[in-house]
């Protein structure tokens, strides 16, 4: 029986196909290269290779894009006809939950798989990504912590676990250990884009903008190449550092260059683009007609059903492009969704809908309505996706709405809240200064 690098049986494969599969796994591990092409080659070499089909479907499901999820659903039908062992059957069960929009059921299924097979690297990494998409900070950390004692430092893939653990530690606020763990992961595998981005998150959350820029510049050869799937997201992190320092021209240059020059239609990349333009809008910087291109790119994904976190970011671009009909379309889709249909539908009704309404109110100058909507929803927004850094746009918008709506008590209180976490942030200091100033309702100077 042919086995993977961690010692698990691989059903239906050949030596040639298994070698292609391992290359695909390595590409997925570090988000560097083209795992889908390698998996297609492995399946061509061994059409009944179960794990190749399963990993391919996992990657399609994790794309959080309607077409890709549809392809994953179609793949499930084929996988059900393959001979699966116990471990592979667990993978199929998790995949079925994921494409149905039941992210927590998928995560728990992979939890149980990993308890039975703690050295299944695919189960750990797919589960880690699902934990990210459902914003479960604790399990981002604990999924890896549970499995790590079953690994040895010389086992293939050990460094990948460290990179995932680093991000979990960061999302649970354990910044010192997160940075140490992430740096250790990168000492072992410098190309690990996820570990690099985990350390970037630490510096963002601690308000270490200058350190963050230095981190990105020093390691740029490892994360900025065309083969790196996370390159746009890492450029987005660098842009956030510049934005915190008030370097808005550099932010716009990064947007026009590395972040949006290729007009990517990958949902992850468009989320970053929308969030960055929105932040520039919050600080009063005119972004011109950039919204129009981005809004058009969102049209293939924003369906009001697949993944609410994406659609909320699509709404930012639709607002900027003046496409109110599409804002209303998505708002109504989530308001009318039956929450019992799936977990994703529940997220849309409870969180995406009020966020869409709130961001629309802000854009249209109804700042007091924006505050009323954003203040309660920010406490549950971590139930439907993204990182703390990504969801910070909610609190940033809330603070700006309070300032512009002359709600000075709220603005000052929230500014203090933000400064308690990032005391050196120029953006947060400016919030407090404006809240205390008689002219606090004025927009920031571009």
Image (cartoon, rainbow, N blue to C red):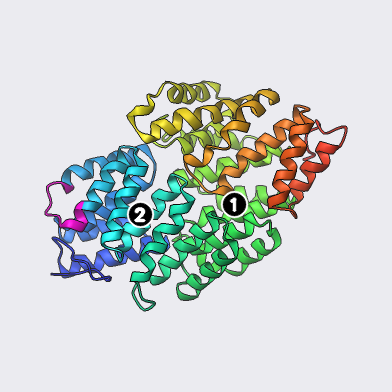
Residue that label 2 marks: 126
Determine whether, in the image, residue 426 is placed left or right of residue 397.
right
For the view shown, which residue lies furthest in the bottom direction?
A: 154
Determine whether, in the image, residue 147 is placed left or right of residue 176.
left
**36 above or below 98?**
below
Tell me what residue is drawn at x 51 percent, y 57 percent.
231
SS state under label 2: helix
Q: Residues within 10 Å of mark 2 (few under 14, many from 20)?
A: many
The numbered mark, 2 or 1, whose residue comes first in the sequence reads: 2
Q: Nearer the viewer, mark 2 or mark 1?
A: 2
Residue that label 1 marks: 257
Q: Which residues are magenta?
A: 79-89
**163 above or below 281?**
below
Q: Residues within 10 Å of mark 1 (few under 14, many from 20)?
A: few
Tell me what residue is drawn at x 79 percent, y 42 percent.
432
Tell me what residue is drawn at x 69 percent, y 58 percent.
209
Quadrant showing the N terminus: bottom left
Query: Percent x, y for residue 22?
Result: 28, 67
Query: Percent x, y for residue 166?
Result: 50, 63
Query: Percent x, y for residue 136?
Result: 46, 48
The answer to which quarter of the image holds residue 143 is: bottom left
Query: Percent x, y for residue 125?
Result: 37, 58
**Could you say which disc has been placed on residue 297 in the image?**
none
**28 above or below 68?**
below
Whether the magenta-drawn stretch holds residue 84 is answered as yes
Does the rendering let one see residue 183?
yes
SS state under label 1: helix
The answer to which quarter of the image holds residue 117 is: bottom left
């Amino acid at each position: 029986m042919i086995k993977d690098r961690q010692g698990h049986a691989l059903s239906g494969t050949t030596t040639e196909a298994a070698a292609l599969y391992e290359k695909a796994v390595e590409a997925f591990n570090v988000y560097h290269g083209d795992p889908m092409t390698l998996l297609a080659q492995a399946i061509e070499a061994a059409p009944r290779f179960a794990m190749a089909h399963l990993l391919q479907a996992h990657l399609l499901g994790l794309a959080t894009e309607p077409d890709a999820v549809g392809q994953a659903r179609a793949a499930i039908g084929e996988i059900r006809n393959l001979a699966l062992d116990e471990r592979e059957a667990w993978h199929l069960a998790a995949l079925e939950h994921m494409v149905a929009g039941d992210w927590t059921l998928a995560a728990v299924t992979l939890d149980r798989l990993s308890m039975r097979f703690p050295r299944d690297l695919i189960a750990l990494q797919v589960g880690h990504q699902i934990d990210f998409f459902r914003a479960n900070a604790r399990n981002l950390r604990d999924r890896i912590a549970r499995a790590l004692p079953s690994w040895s430092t010389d086992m293939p893939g050990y460094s990948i676990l460290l990179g995932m653990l680093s991000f979990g530690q960061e999302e649970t606020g354990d910044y010192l250990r997160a940075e140490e763990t992430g740096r250790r992961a990168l000492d072992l595998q410098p190309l690990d884009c996820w570990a690099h981005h985990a350390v970037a998150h630490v510096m963002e959350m601690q308000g270490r903008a200058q350190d963050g820029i230095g981190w990105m510049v020093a390691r740029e050869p490892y994360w900025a190449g065309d083969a790196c799937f996370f390159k746009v997201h890492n450029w987005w992190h660098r842009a956030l550092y510049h934005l915190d320092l008030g370097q808005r021209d550099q932010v716009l240059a990064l947007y026009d260059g590395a972040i949006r020059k290729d007009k990517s239609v990958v949902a992850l990349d468009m989320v970053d683009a929308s969030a960055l333009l929105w932040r520039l809008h919050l600080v009063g910087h005119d972004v011109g007609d950039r919204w129009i291109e981005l809004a058009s790119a969102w049209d293939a994904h924003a369906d009001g059903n697949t993944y609410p976190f994406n659609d909320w970011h699509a709404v930012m671009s639709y607002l900027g492009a003046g496409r109110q009909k599409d804002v209303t379309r998505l708002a109504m889709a989530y308001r009318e969704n039956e929450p019992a249909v799936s977990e994703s539908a529940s997220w849309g009704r409870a969180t995406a809908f009020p966020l869409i309404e709130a961001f629309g109110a802000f854009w249209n100058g109804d700042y007091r309505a924006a505050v009323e909507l954003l203040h309660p929803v920010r406490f549950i927004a971590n139930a439907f996706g993204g990182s703390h850094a990504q969801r910070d746009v909610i609190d940033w918008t809330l603070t700006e709405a309070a300032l512009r709506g002359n709600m000075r008590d709220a603005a000052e209180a929230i500014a203090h809240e933000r400064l308690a976490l990032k005391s050196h942030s120029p953006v947060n200091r400016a919030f407090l200064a404006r809240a205390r100033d008689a002219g606090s309702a004025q927009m920031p100077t571009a």
